[in-house]
Image: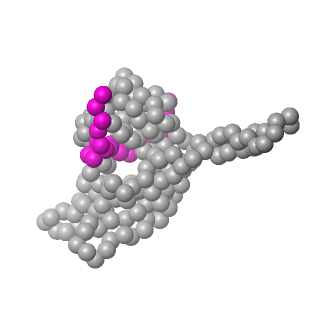
Amino acid sequence: MALYNSDGRRKLVLLATTPADIDAIPVASATAGTDISDWTLKSSMVNVSSGSDTFDASVWSSRGNATAFGASNMDGNFLIIHREYDASDSQPDATLDATWASVKTKGTTLRFLTRNSAKLSGEAFTAGDEYRYAEYVTDDPIAESPDDGSYIKFRIPLSPSGVMALDKLIVI
């Protein structure tokens, strides 16, 4: 058995539409998305479970308390390196700046597909890859650009929309 650290092995893809079956996303749908791994900082929390709802599940004849798990919950925020500029005129590059264009407006639905595996981030999806899928609605971007010479970046708060599939396999 080989163990791998996650360094450079997380893939984050933004899908344009909701897959027909979120529990069995085909390779073609996964690869049709925009790979935004190169613009996403490691401190981002996308498609992370945040604990299920709980409810009292004690029956009248039992002594003590019992709790059962209900609906799953997700949490998230997305920290991106903001903007890709054209070196010739220092204006945003219309092609490379697609990540920012897709997240900058409050209320936008984002469809995230993540893969955490032994594969490197740049490797293509194949059938059998394990994934997590969730949809979120964005809030206003929060500027997080310290004056320390680091990247210009924004944190995008995410509100789960209730559409999710955890630990499923990519299909042909």
- Quadrant for the C terminus in the image: top left
Work out whether 120 lies above or below 154: above
Residue at the spot 36% in from the left edge and 40% down from the top edge: 116
Residue 29 visible at all: no
- Image: magenta residue range: 1-22
Residue at the spot 33% in from the left edge and 65% down from the top edge: 153
Q: Is residue 129 magenta?
A: no
- The residue most toward the left is 88
Q: Quadrant of residue 93?
A: bottom left
Residue 89 visible at all: yes
Work out whether 157 lies above or below 31: below
- Quadrant for the N terminus in the image: top left
**Left or right relative to 25: residue 54:** right
Majority secondary structure in the magenta region = loop
- The residue most toward the front is 63
Work out whether 85 lies above or below 72: below
**Left or right relative to 7: residue 16:** right
Q: Point out residue 161 in the picture as x, y percentages from the top left corner.
A: 56, 48
Q: Point out residue 33 in the picture as x, y percentages from the top left corner.
A: 35, 40
Q: Point out residue 11 in the picture as x, y percentages from the top left corner.
A: 32, 43
Q: Judge by depth and name the residue closer to the eye, 135 or 62.
A: 62
Q: Point out residue 67 in the picture as x, y percentages from the top left corner.
A: 71, 42
Q: Is residue 19 magenta?
A: yes
**Left or right relative to 37: residue 142:** right
**Left or right relative to 111: residue 36:** left
Residue at the spot 45% in from the left edge and 31% down from the top edge: 168
Residue at the spot 49% in from the left edge and 36% down from the top edge: 166
Number of labels in the image equals 0
Q: Judge by depth and name the residue closer to the eye, 48 or 56.
A: 56
- The residue most toward the bottom is 147
- The residue most toward the top is 172
